[in-house]
Amino acid sequence: KIVQKNGDDILYQLLKINDDLSKARVSLIGISNDLKFTEYLDPRVRSRLADEKMVFPPYNAEELFDILSERARLAFENGTAEDAVLHLISALAAQEHGDARRALDLLRVSAELAERQGDEHITEEHVQRAKNKIELDTVIEAVKSLPTQSKVILLGILLNEEIGNAKLTTGEVYTTYRELCRKTGIVPLTQRRVTDLISELDMLGLVHARVRSFGRGGRTKEIQASVPPLDVKKVLEKDEILAEARGYRLKVQTTLL
């Protein structure tokens, strides 16, 4: 994060410290979840770094179970989180990411749900509900942090879904996008730029966009939402800039044969 915020000059200065030391040496230890981190550095920094990479694999289910068992022993009354529940959380976490912190989050949210219901034991149902809640919270936070133009695009996709247009072409998305821009007073972007923003939404997992070929008719993206529509629409409509779009519905287009 230091390098992202301040550039790699600070890293270069740290590496130069050894030039001024005669009775000591400085070693740097860095941690990153980006395996290509060093490729982004200035060549002069890379040449001085002479780094040795160590890759730490994700935790497996057995390792996660051991971590959860120890934390559960310290945090809960005996019997609150039984082994079957801890094994379930461990398995879910190992299959998805192997991240101990996120496994602990799942245990914590499961316990909070059990406590709110007045239950003395964490059950598998609590775990499944906690998993759904964490996933939804992650989506909501991602949507809240979107730039305004991306929010307009996503709202347009969801509004189309409301009237049965689940799979949209880029052109259809752009038409709705321009309609919402007129409604909210937002200056519209070009279709090419909107296409780029759709790709960014796809990378975030908020929409699913796949290229569809029409033979000689060319190719276009087929786009559909990948988020809970009602929850996400509520979040988007709370944005003050999109206030004019609250409760807005698209007209259903009919074709006469």
Image (cartoon, helix red, strand yellow):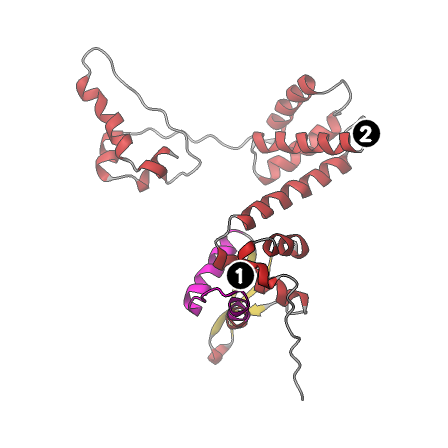
Which residue is farthest bottom? 257
Spatial CA span between label 1 and label 2: 42 Å
Q: Can residue 102 be seen in this view?
A: yes
- In screen coordinates, is 255 left or right of 27? right
Name the magenta segment's main secondary structure: helix
Q: Where is residue 233 in the image (x, y as percent from the top left)?
A: 63, 56
Q: Can residue 208 be seen in this view?
A: no
Residue located 49% across and 53% down the image: 203
- In screen coordinates, is 195 left or right of 166? left
Question: Which of the 4 quarters of the picture holds residue 165?
Answer: bottom right
Q: In which quarter of the image is the N terminus?
A: top left
Which segment did they paint magenta? 176-204
Numbered badge on residue 170? none
Numbered badge on residue 119? 2
Mark 1 or mark 2, whichever is nearer to me: 1
Residue 252 vs 195, above or below: the answer is below
Q: What's the residue type where badge 1 is placed?
A: Val
Numbered badge on residue 152? 1
Residue 186 vs 98, above or below: the answer is below
Q: Are marks 1 and 2 in contact (CB under 8 Å)?
A: no
